[in-house]
Amino acid sequence: MSVAELTEDSFLKANRISQEEWQASAIDWQTLHQIGLNHEANIEQLKETAEMYARIIQRCQQVHSVRWRVKDPQHLMEKIVRKTQPNTPTFKEKYVGINETNYDSIVTDLIGVRALHLFKEDCLPIHDYLCQEWKNAEAPIYYVRSGDDKVFADLPDDVVVKVHPAGYRSLHYVFGSQPLSRIVYTEVQVRTIFEEGWTEIDHKIRYPNFSHNEQVCSFLLIFNRLAGSADEMGSFVKQLVSELELHQHAIDEITQKSEENAQEVANLFKLLEQNESKQQGSQELIDKLREQVEQLQAEKKALHRAAKQHAINTLSLNAKAKCKASELIK
């Protein structure tokens, strides 16, 4: 339904706002309706800005995919009602006095862009990339779930870490750009694909029908832990593969050197056969051959040790992987 067709009663009913909540809000219907009309008229322009952000972010090597949206006018209006109810958890002081001329400088998520990545640690180079492209309008926020025992120690000092009440995990940025006469703010969220899946399901289920249902919230919390465990396992498997490749590379180098020495020994034997009649030259070749054989034997022992160590490391890493998997699914 177009904002122009909305009435006060139809808006409250469609967005499940009670009369008590509406009366507690510090905004009147005329102002709220005008904000909705103004935002609806600017949607196409905002879409162009969103597409620009998405194109630039997708160029980052660590970004797997990008999603974007422009806030629905009724969702914006409903948010303003929630943010203008004093003495409630959703109240925000900056929303007091909001109107059609200043709402786009107060509401910083009229445009929302999500940059999705595979591994948790990928957020660090993505952070650097975003901050090179745009200037932060607000300090970046890293949301974590209560109980998360690890926050990246090498996050920049300007990133604020906060526990999200609903358990969301992601980095949030607010950037400002000015494609036309006014500054347009865009919220960029950076999170893993697993976290995006949980967030989407949580949002679909929790809002608006079962937001206070204890059983539903309990299952969503379990699902949240599974998403976090999947992220941990993804990073662990990546590290496991990297270590296995390093071990294999060391063995390959020793093997190649051993083969090269074996070929050199074979060549010396040929020279020795050709110079059997030349005692002096033959003795020199024998001495050199002896050195090569001794070196070959030493490298053979080293190869055996490396292969043995590789087998031990592989068993150890596999054991670690099984323990990690068992730990994460508890």
Image (cartoon, rainbow, N blue to C red):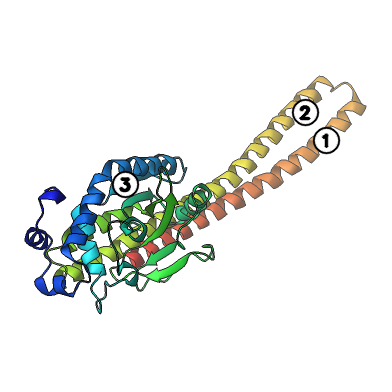
Tag in front: 2 or 3: 3
Drawn side of residue 263 relative to residue 69, left or right? right
Q: CA distance from mark 1 to mark 2?
A: 8 Å
So how many labels did they put on this image? 3
Q: Which residue is mark 3?
A: 68
Q: Which mark is residue 268?
A: 2
Disc 1, disc 2: CB below 8 Å? yes
Instruction: Give the mark nearer the N terminus: 1 vs 2.
Output: 2
Q: CA distance from mark 2 to mark 3?
A: 69 Å
Q: Is residue 172 above or below residue 327?
A: above
Image position, residue 223 (x, y; %):
24, 63
> Mark 1 falls on what kind of element?
helix
Tag in front: 1 or 3: 3
- Name which residue lies at 23% across and 62% down: 79
Quadrant location of the C terminus in the rendered image: bottom left
Q: Residue furthest bottom?
A: 87
Locate residue 192: give its quadrant: bottom left
> Mark 2 falls on what kind of element?
helix
Drawn side of residue 185 relative to residue 271, left or right? left
- Name which residue lies at 74% across and 43% down: 295
User: Which amino acid type corresponds to the residue marked 1 in the rendered image?
Assistant: Lys
Q: Which residue is mark 1?
A: 288
Q: CA distance from mark 1 to mark 3?
A: 71 Å
User: Which amino acid type corresponds to the residue marked 2 in the rendered image?
Assistant: Leu
> Mark 3 falls on what kind of element?
strand
Image position, residue 275 (x, y; %):
84, 22
